[in-house]
Image (spheres, rainbow, N blue to C red):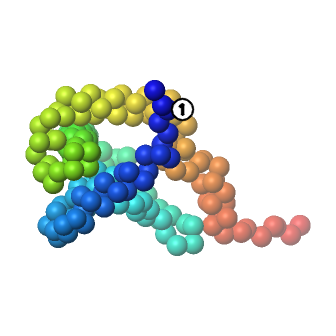
Amino acid sequence: MFAISAVDAISPALQRTRTLLFRPFRLGTFLKLCLVAAVTEGTGNFNSSVPGGHTRHADASVFSPFLWTPARIAAGVAMTLLVLLLCGYLLYLVTRLRFAFFHCLIHNTREIRPGWALYRSQAARFFWLNVVVGFGYLLVLAPFPGWVMGGSAHSCTAHCRSSAPAIPPQAA
């Protein structure tokens, strides 16, 4: 039995992809598989930072603690649960679509439906693994909210100090 390395698999994988997409070239197949690849693997990082390294701060009067009524709290909790359920469902669909896409590439077929039906249980297991690992990640990093949110309390303090107007010392 011979050892298989990842480097040896690159050339056959590229050849198989070239055959699937371009021999014969069909625009519909090409666009369908490109869309599936973009949805399942992502299209990039859309960071919403402001040029110059400064972030926008909300007006403190809009988010006053006195505006929190029980109805708003209940609506916020309901919306949060709805968003979490919707995100979970979309993550499950993307996971199944990823398995269907791999099926297309492995079996040199242009049909999404067979892979969608064939790998249902494996996609479900992989989805639940992603959920468990994600919650584990959040539990481990819960004591460090600055890292999870992409910054730290130190950088916020430094920014607040640098943007505050300087008070001249009092002459005696």
Residue at x 57% of width, y 72% of height? 52
Q: Amino acid at mark 1?
A: Pro
Mark 1: which secondary structure?
Answer: loop
Task: Say left or right for 93 vs 117.
Answer: right
Residue at x 42% of width, y 60% of height? 45
Residue at x 33% of width, y 29% of height? 129
Q: Residue furthest front?
A: 1
Residue 44 at what x, y percent from top left? Answer: 40, 60
Task: Say left or right for 127 vs 142.
Answer: left
Which residue is disc 1 drawn over?
143
Residue 139 showing in the rendered view = no
Placement of 122 over or under 168, stated as above or below: above
Front-lying residue, 68 or 51: 51
Residue 12 showing in the rendered view = yes
Q: Residues within 10 Å of mark 1 (few under 14, many from 20)?
A: few
Residue 120 at what x, y percent from top left? Answer: 17, 33
Task: Say left or right for 19 vs 8.
Answer: left
Please state the total of marks drawn on the protein image.
Answer: 1
Front-lying residue, 3 or 102: 3
Residue 83 at what x, y percent from top left? Answer: 23, 44
Task: Say left or right for 24 vs 49.
Answer: left
